[in-house]
Image (spheres, rainbow, N blue to C red):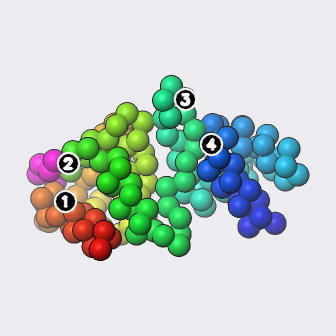
């Protein structure tokens, strides 16, 4: 049942119909799944869904398709990162408004050595890195991952 429910939720998300947890609960209940917000919250986490801004509206989107994780990482980085800067132990990535959380989620799913934490705002992602490695080194690792995925 969980697999079917999550597949139904993913389709609703991919169709752009889910703009809140409450709408997901309502839509799933209309489709015969008796769910609560807690169940939907867990399903959204399992699917890697994040809220993004779509024009003047917000909606859920899935960031990573498990069968194409590398391609999704590359696509997210290529489509949403507009600039990158490194300073000391911080990396700053700029994105279009409303897309920083998509980039942060894609980075969070990977294990990048030296990354201590990632924080996303509306259009900025801050990556805190181990001082021993430095931001320049970790940024080069991220850029190498991108080039490896693009091959």
Distance from disc 3 to disc 2, alpha carbons, whole Å, reads 27 Å
Q: Which residue is mark 2?
A: 84
Q: Which residue is found at the position 41% from the left and 66% from the top?
A: 71
Q: Secondary structure at mark 1?
A: helix
Label at residue 139: 1
Q: Which residue is found at the position 57% from the left and 38% from the top?
A: 59
Distance from disc 3 to disc 4, alpha carbons, whole Å, reads 11 Å
Q: Which residue is mark 3?
A: 57
Q: Is residue 95 left or right of residue 90?
A: right
Distance from disc 3 to disc 1, alpha carbons, whole Å, reads 32 Å
Q: Secondary structure at mark 3?
A: strand
Distance from disc 2 to disc 4, alpha carbons, whole Å, reads 29 Å
The answer to which quarter of the image holds residue 110 is bottom left
Q: Secondary structure at mark 4?
A: loop
| Contact, mark 2 vs mark 1 (Cβ under 8 Å) | yes
Q: Is residue 107 left or right of residue 147?
A: right
Q: Which residue is mark 4?
A: 16
Q: Quadrant of the C terminus?
A: bottom left
Q: Which residue is found at the position 30% from the left and 68% from the top?
A: 150
């Amino acid at each position: 049942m969980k697999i079917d429910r999550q597949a139904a939720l993913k389709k609703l998300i991919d169709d752009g119909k889910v703009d809140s947890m409450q709408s997901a609960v309502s839509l799933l209940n209309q489709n015969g799944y008796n769910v609560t917000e807690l169940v939907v919250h867990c399903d959204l986490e399992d699917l890697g869904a994040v809220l993004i801004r779509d024009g003047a509206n917000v909606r859920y989107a899935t960031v990573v398709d498990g069968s194409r994780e590398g391609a999704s990482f590359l696509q997210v980085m290529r489509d949403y990162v507009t600039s990158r800067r490194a300073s000391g132990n911080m990396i700053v990535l700029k994105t279009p408004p409303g897309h920083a959380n998509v980039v942060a989620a894609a980075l969070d799913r990977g294990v990048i050595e030296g990354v201590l934490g990632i924080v996303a705002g509306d259009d900025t992602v801050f990556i805190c890195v181990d001082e021993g490695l430095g931001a320049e080194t970790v940024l080069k690792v991220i850029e190498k991952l991108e080039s490896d995925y693009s091959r």
